[in-house]
Amino acid sequence: MARVLVLSFEFPPLGGGGGVVIEHLCNELSKKGHSFDVVTMGYKGLPKEEQVGACKVYRVPCLRAKKELSTPLELQSYLFSAFVKAEQLLLTNHYDLAHVHFIIPTGNLGFATKLVNRLPFIISTHGSDMPGYNPDRFGFLHKLLIPFWTLFVKNATVVTTPSESLRSLLLKSWKGDSTKVKAIPWGIDVRPAPKKKENRIVFAGRLFERKGAQYLVEAVKELNMKGWEVAIVGDGPMRKQLEAQAKGMPFVKFYGWLPREKLQNLYDHSKIFVFPSTAESFGMVLAEAMSAEMAVVTCNDSACPEVVGDAGILVPPKNHESIRIALQKLMASPTEIARLGKKGRKRVLAKFAWPICAAAFDKIYTQTAQKK
């Protein structure tokens, strides 16, 4: 079984779905005998060292100012501190491999530890580290860093993507050995089936333009919302704009950032999930909502159709009218909500439960450790 050095700037409670995935993946793989030391970003009020589930977590000094996101300068400050901590750990511990999350910036650490310590590493990409993904926010940075991005991918033993959509995007920039790039969907914890649902439509995600909460708010303006609530869960730079857009719509509630347990409880007691995102590497919130038997409405773009399949309603991106029509149909038919909810949960159990994901990574760990 492998002892793994995990390198990631995101780990709960910092960041979004990426950090949650890392924590759960380590916990699931620990059941197969693997052990994990995680070197991640420090943050005010968080301990420098602690045991979190299966992970021994080391939080290093950096300039991070917000829980939900970090700037390029903050990421750069993490890289220096993380390399120092990784070298300290490598002096005293034997590791079989490093698991690097995010090609940029953390691939830098994987490459450095391979160069200095001959430690093989695998990379898991999460989306924002991919050229061509979210170009409005990272386009210039991706172009600037493409030589380094290519170097890190080339030197990794395996690169994993959470969807075929993201794998295809990677292979547009990477002209090397495509067989080492593997699509492995992220897993989720499937909770017991919910028993009671309320008339609530939920959006959950960081409040960036590409996530599309503005199209949901626009869609419900034209609907009869008597007896229904729209819950906007999350925080980010668009919050004030969205609150202004929803002025005069008392049924639209802004919940802000919710701890994982409270968010899952909201899913369990809500009927419809709307996620009009135009760029997703996987769409963890979609799988979570489906597992809670919510009827899902999402875009027919990026990885969203891979997650939802035929167990939800797919609409064109940036189209509030299509969302309005879908919601109108669902709100008028409790039977259809229940049908899609049950179909979605069945799909999650078959494709996205953690044991399925962990088995694929267990195979990669074993093969990588044997090549050391």
Image (spheres, grey):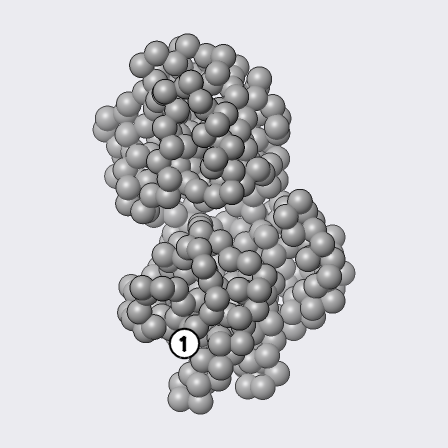
**Residue 125 seen in this snapshot:** yes
Furthest toward the bottom, the residue is: 91
> Left or right: where does residue 89 sit relative to residue 306?
left
In the image, residue 342 lies at what x, y percent?
36, 28
Q: Nearer the viewer, residue 28 or 229?
A: 229
User: Which residue does the image show at 68% across and 57% down from the upper left?
Assistant: 141
Amino acid on which disc 1 is placed: Arg
Q: Nearer the viewer, residue 346 or 96?
A: 96
Quarter occupied by the C terminus: bottom right
Quarter occupied by the N terminus: bottom left
User: Which residue does the image show at 47% across and 37% down from the upper left?
Assistant: 239
> Left or right: where does residue 367 sit relative to residue 38?
right
In the image, residue 94 lies at what x, y percent?
42, 85
Q: Which residue is mark 1?
A: 3
In the image, residue 325 lies at what x, y percent?
52, 15
Q: Residues within 10 Å of mark 1 (few under 14, many from 20)?
A: some
